[in-house]
Image (tube, grey):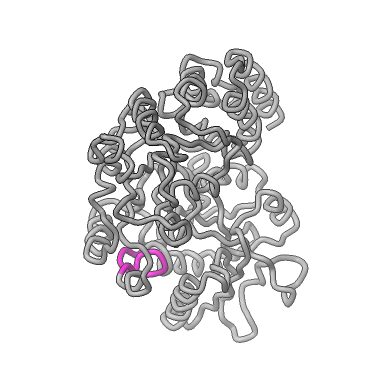
Amino acid sequence: MRSTGFRRTFVALSVCSLALTASACGSGDDSASGKTRITVNCMPPKSAKVDRRFFEQDIASFEKQNPDIEVAAHDAFPCQDPKTFDAKLAGGQMEDVFYTYFTDAKHVVDIKQAADLTPYIKELKSYDTIQKQLRDIYTVDGKVYGVPRTGYSMGLIYNRKLFEKAGLDPDRPPATWDEVRSDAKKIAALGNGTVGYADYSAQNQGGWHFTAELYSQGGDVVSADGKKATIDTPEGRAVLQTLHDMRWTDNSMGSKQLLVINDVQQMMGSGKLGMYLSAPDNIPILVKEKGGNYKDLALAPMPGGKGTLIGGDGYMFNKHDTPAQIRAGLQWLDHMFLTPGTGFLGDYARAKKADAPVGLPEPRLFTGAADAKDQQVKKANANVPVANYQTFLDGNHTLQMKIEPPDAQQIYSVLDGTVSAVLTKKDADIDQLLKDASGKIDSILARG
């Protein structure tokens, strides 16, 4: 899954221009003018006016600095549709430089649709400054097939105002699941439709959150070799038992279930929800679209203290790309996304002028001097209450960062049923639910 938010996680699926040949979105190395031409995707749509303007400005400045390169950007929503992604690859309809989730990297390589960037990667000036664990996601069998662009990690968003009303210290968010349960009960006791803790349980989002909660307990969804489910464990039972007890014993999760992200965001934005799991990018949505206030919203690390789910995105290159297109694409990535203090994601001064949030606690993409520069510029232009997120930043240092499992969407679909059963049936048999889900996940992994 991806976390849904503004700027750093804005996504848009490319649709090939009808003017291009049916053979591929990648139009070939040279245009009529003799320039190296590359097609790229994930340009914000016209409806996202600020992001669109920034993206177009950055492409224009790149082409001015590199007059021998022409960039054709494509947009639509979202950047990648899992239902059409493989078909576009197989049909030769993918751009020269195309957006992927972290979980796509090995799959795209396995089906032989990715260009090997290894001979060219030294030309990406920023490559060695990127966090190694993120670079490794796009490295398969020692070869580099892609470049990370953004990352996120899950945490606990909570309402400081409700914590105060419930007699809780907003500067000391819950660090364990027992504390989450206790705090949620006190918040729900405020009455008037207030919910202490909410969770997703539909549209694959329940499975996504189950995975994050399992990681927080120190568990895993699949074995290290990717062949067997590992949810029928004490950690898996602990996740479901906690949800069951908050829902049915404490009545701290409200009576309405089968929630998805928009439902929970509405609850938090309206001031009726105490806590839910999310990434930092949800915060501006809660303010700009759901009626929330930055000063009331804070972020803590994942409860449990053992691990958290990370995700993110990057770019891979079409297997049909020429060496010139690969080199041009790497130059474009450096310019657009990977130079601290500039570009679409790094020009914090420009973002601040456009009233875009600056200072949210995204996981750090860079290391060393590049990270220091990125943090310096971000701090200088921060327009959100960064103190509200310090606990999250401090706590993340001690957590194991774990990527989503293989065949994530299919697995999440199975786990949706597991989570929804616990939240909608008081007498749900947790042991049987885990056993049944394990069998289904094993079948998915066997097919893969």
Residue at the front extreme of this rendering: 192
**Depth order, front residue of 416/16:** 416
* Image-based side of 87 in relation to 133, left or right: right
State which quadrant residue 98 falls in.
Answer: bottom right
Badge count: 0
Quarter of the picture holding the C terminus: top right
Residue 115 in picture, x, y percent from top left: 58, 55
Residue at the bottom extreme of this rendering: 33
Residue for point 74% across, 74% down: 18
Q: Is residue 250 above or below residue 172?
A: above
Residue 262 in picture, x, y percent from top left: 54, 49
Q: Magenta region: which residues?
A: 339-348
Residue 342 lies within the magenta run: yes
Quarter of the picture holding the N terminus: top right
Residue for point 28% across, 60% down: 374
Residue 186 lies within the magenta run: no
**Depth order, front residue of 164/310:** 164
Residue 216 in picture, x, y percent from top left: 41, 29
Residue 125 in picture, x, y percent from top left: 36, 62
